[in-house]
Amino acid sequence: MAILLLPFLADNSVADVPLHVGGTGGVYFLAEPGQLVIELEKRDLNRSGRRADLRAILVGPDRRVIEENTLPDDGQPRGSGRGPVQSATLTTQVERKGVYGLNITVSNDRYGNEVAWGFQSNCPHYLIETARGHVDRRREERLVFLDADRPRGICFRPRAGEFGIEIRRFATSAPPPKLFYSHDMEVATLDVAADGHAACQVPADPQRSQSPWRLHLPQGQAEVHIDGVTRWDNNDTYPDLPLWTPDRKSWFPLLENRWLITPYQRTAYGEPAAEGKIAFRVHNNAATQQTVRLAVEFPGEPWDAYLAQEEVTLAAKQAQHVTLHYTLPDTGKRTLHIRATPQANSTFSTYATLQVKTGRPPAADRLEIPLILKPYEHENEQLGYLPQYPVDNQVYFDAKNRPFVCTGDGVVTVRDGDWAKTSFRKGISSADADLAGQAYRTASTKVAFDGGNGVYLLGFGGRRAALLYSGDGGQSFAAAPIPGRETSPRTFDLEQFSGHNGNDGPPPIVRFTRTATDPRHRWRRINDLELFVFAWDGDRLLGQPPILLSKMAIGLSVHSGIPSSIVSRGDKIHVAWAEATDPEEDVPGVPTYVATYDRRAKVLSKPVLVGYGAPPNDIHNTPSITMDSQGHLHVLVGTHGQPFQYARSLKPNDTSSGWTEPTSTGGDWRQTYIGFVCDQHDTLHLVSRVWQYGQPPHEAGHHATLAHQQMPRHGSWAAPRVLVVPPFSEYSIFYHRLTIDRTARLFLSYDCWSTYWFYRTDWPGDRRALMFSDDGGVRWKLAESPDLGR
């Protein structure tokens, strides 16, 4: 087998061993028909003593998993230095040209600090993507080289604008690094300081060639940053795509053709001989207009399937959906591939796969809980889940139990037996001159309803916030301004149905306006918290002046769980919030308060402390409030990696007459992000992220799960029951949102998000799915359109 992972040396000779790098991520191969062989190496660095199993997954152009291999921890003690070389070989027979992927992750080490890995392959065209786990700050993907005794090279596409190169931990005894143009003409020599740092700045050149440049490291141990490759500006052409190679000859045009055709694979079910159609997305990631040719390929005998169009011309960074029409077989299954080839560069070509099967999809049956997601095999690949309803966000139900979904620039519901969208881009009326004629974007994913079945959402018209209202079932909307605070960072919440709350009027709103941050404490925020109450004046919706609830609110975290800040009944509006405290003060967590505003008397009660959520000064610790059929208020105090704390009001519809002592949701589980509703039997339902350690299918490390708990009336909290398991170990989040319909069915919208950038950025968009339970969370099923009332 030819060794092709070979950097240039100073004299243009090549090394005879694969380089070893730190971090995680993987490799993309543009493979021609024939055998593809990849030899993988790993060495443990034994820095922390944590178990570091390297997981390697080889996938095809359609992201079908071909082979998986694990190189285990070497068992050496902490501080023992580099362990022995371990190796594995992954092979496949390439039937048709396309972009194959090698995915690299490490248990207990999402940043790849515990291993060095490298590879060899007989594929001449490949690109490495250094892509670790996420960090809660601006993304950077430094290149870490761990071959002190060998020269190495970094070939990369330079940005047209000015860019810098920074090298750290370079040996001062070695010759200085050099930077070369695409034709090996020297650009600069980087002088190395006594501390091992070197840097250079390259001026902008709008005419700069797109051919790769090369950074030569005479000694292959260093950490390297290159602007536009490992860190990015907002105007970069290819942000968050840290692609490079040690060999200029291996470069192929992946950057401009990333996500050329997706979904990479789809499985569809149907009745025998029925006709079907499915949309595939063609994307032009290049900086200029591009035409993409499409063709259907059959692995066996051709069958009845065709594309609506075989050529798509796209502007820069634009995408278009192309429909494939097909007829299902009488029995069994059929497969086809959709080839996509840029007309201007036919050396690049890849494909997506469609498999159609006769019969009922497994997604139509009750789920076997937990649903265990696998790498590149989520709900569609495993179960044939192919929703015909919008999955942009969670679903809410009006008083007639009709579904509504916020899409970000509008709202979708069922009208005349089909899904219909009302766009907020135009046509929204307003009595406010500054809001009239504006294009709106939504300020929250929540949808609310009043007693007359009016529909409400929150939106922004320019920078102005507004309450959007529809009296005709969501067909048209008007906007009422939410006054003030147009320049400060703002977050809004409005009351949504959570089981037994609501009133005849417009939903109350709270606004968190950030007034301070704390550079010493990442998650500490300080906000003004204000309540807004709207009422009708004839046919106009008017807001009262804001009612200040707190000057020290920690803020609102609603991307996961979609917690409720507000519930109301009659004239009583109840708000729950958490506060920041003095970091020098010894408190058990973020204090959570409740207060009541009487809209008739226009009186605000004194805040009441109901509990603390650990740790202190953490914006993740957003509480949630709901109400049972008797009017008792129930509050879960938010935590970040600890059991939630629970309290109940002693009197119905009253925050001032006492609360039960806060108690834990039980056990010692680590949970975060509250989804909280109350059903018709007054059973409380909680869905949250819960961590597991050393448990299958990720025994080597830890992993997050999406889990359901319930507490019956006068009962206690049950242990979390895992609903969804992620495809990878280490950090995950589910962006879950729990809602309830008017018949007490539970609806759980979720999108499994892995920490690993290589996996996430390979798929454009999200993978959101919707499951529901009609028996109080005992059994769950992926929703179909009829389950939503269509």
Image (cartoon, rainbow, N blue to C red):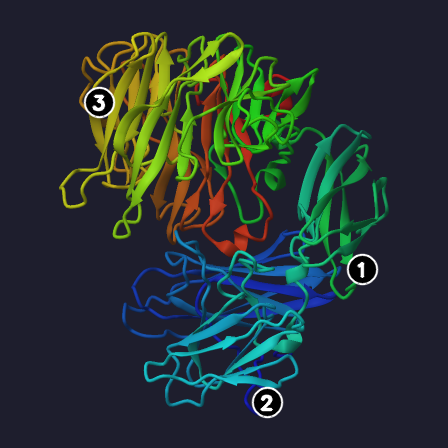
Q: Quadrant of the N terminus?
A: bottom right
Q: Amino acid at mark 2?
A: Ser
* Sequence-wise first label, 1 or 3: 1
Up-down: is 593 above or below 332? above
Structural crowding at the residue carrying mark 3, measured as other residues with C-alpha within 10 Å and reported as few (<14), some (14–19) or many (≥20): some
| Mark carried by residue 607 | 3
Q: Are marks 1 and 3 in contact (CB under 8 Å)?
A: no
Q: Secondary structure at mark 2?
A: loop
Q: Quadrant of residue 564?
A: top left
Residue 519 image offset from top left, x and y in percent: 28, 52
Q: Amino acid at mark 1?
A: Gln
Residue occupied by mark 1: 343
Could you tell me which residue is drawn at 24 percent across and 26 percent down? 593
Task: Classify mark 1: residues with Cα within 10 Å, few (<14), some (14-19) or many (20+).
Answer: some
Residue name at image x 31 percent, y 36 percent: 527
**Which residue is situated farthest in the front direction here?**
433
Q: CA distance from mark 1 to mark 2?
A: 35 Å
Residue 633: where, in percent of width, then height? 30, 16
User: On the rendered structure, is 317 left or right of 583?
Assistant: right
The residue lying toward the viewer, choosing from 631 and 73, is 631
Which tag, 3 or 2, sits closer to the chain's start?
2
Amino acid type for the residue under numbered disc 3? Pro
